[in-house]
Image: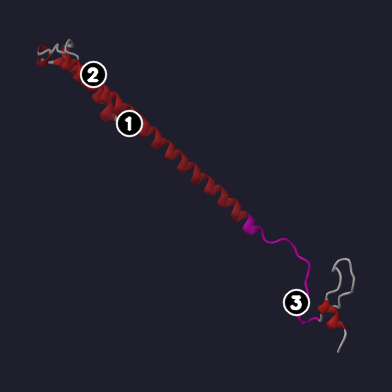
């Protein structure tokens, strides 16, 4: 970043032949259109590089900030998940541990909850 920004003033001094810091090359002025075109191209190239550098730095800062934000969100979310895990389960009513050994209660026929009796239910209810 420093190298590019420090190069821009030096390039501007070297491109300006009327400057006292230009050195001995200042007397070799080219007044033809080719020199003007070359100077314009160099100035455009410098401006393009500065824009690219600015865009790159902006993208890099954005990525770093977004990454930091994601780390902070992950830390906060992990803390709340740990609190919920340590809180334990809600209280439950006691259940018969041998529920699978109990006989099933007979279903009533025509009950509103169960619906009409099936053909298989009637066959099971009456021994053959």
Q: Residue at x 75, y 77 (%)?
A: 97
Q: Could you tell me which residue is drawn at 42 percent across and 40 percent down?
A: 64
* Real-space CA distance between mark 3 and mark 1, rounded to the nearest whole angstrom: 71 Å
Q: Quadrant of residue 106?
A: bottom right
x and y percent of residue 95 in the render?
77, 72
User: Does the magenta portion include 98?
Assistant: yes
Q: Residues within 10 Å of mark 1 (few under 14, many from 20)?
A: some
Give percent across and percent down for residue 55: 37, 31
**Residue 26, placed above or below residue 99:** above
Please provide percent x and percent y for residue 92: 76, 65
Q: Which residue is mark 2?
A: 40
Q: Nearer the viewer, mark 2 or mark 3?
A: 2
Magenta residues? 84-102
Distance from label 1 to label 2 (Cα)? 20 Å
Q: How many marks?
A: 3
Q: Which residue is mark 1?
A: 53
The quarter in which the C terminus is drawn is: bottom right
Q: Alpha-carbon neighbours of circle 3 within 10 Å: few (<14), some, or many (≥20)?
A: few
Camera-near label (3 vs 1) is 1
Of badges 1 and 2, the one in the foreground is 2
Please, is residue 25 above or below residue 84 in the view?
above
Q: Which residue is mark 3?
A: 97
């Amino acid at each position: 970043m420093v190298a590019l920004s420090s190069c821009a003033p030096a390039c501007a001094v070297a491109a300006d032949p009327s400057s006292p810091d230009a050195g001995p090359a200042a007397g070799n002025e080219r007044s033809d259109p080719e020199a003007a075109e070359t100077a314009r191209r160099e100035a455009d190239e410098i401006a393009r590089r500065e824009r690219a550098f600015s865009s790159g730095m902006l993208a890099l800062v954005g990525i770093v900030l977004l990454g930091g934000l994601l780390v902070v969100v992950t830390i906060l979310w992990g803390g709340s998940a740990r609190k919920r895990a340590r809180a334990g389960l809600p209280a439950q009513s006691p259940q018969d541990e041998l529920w699978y050994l109990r006989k099933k209660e007979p279903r009533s026929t025509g009950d509103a909850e169960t619906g009409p009796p099936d053909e298989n239910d009637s066959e099971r209810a009456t021994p053959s």
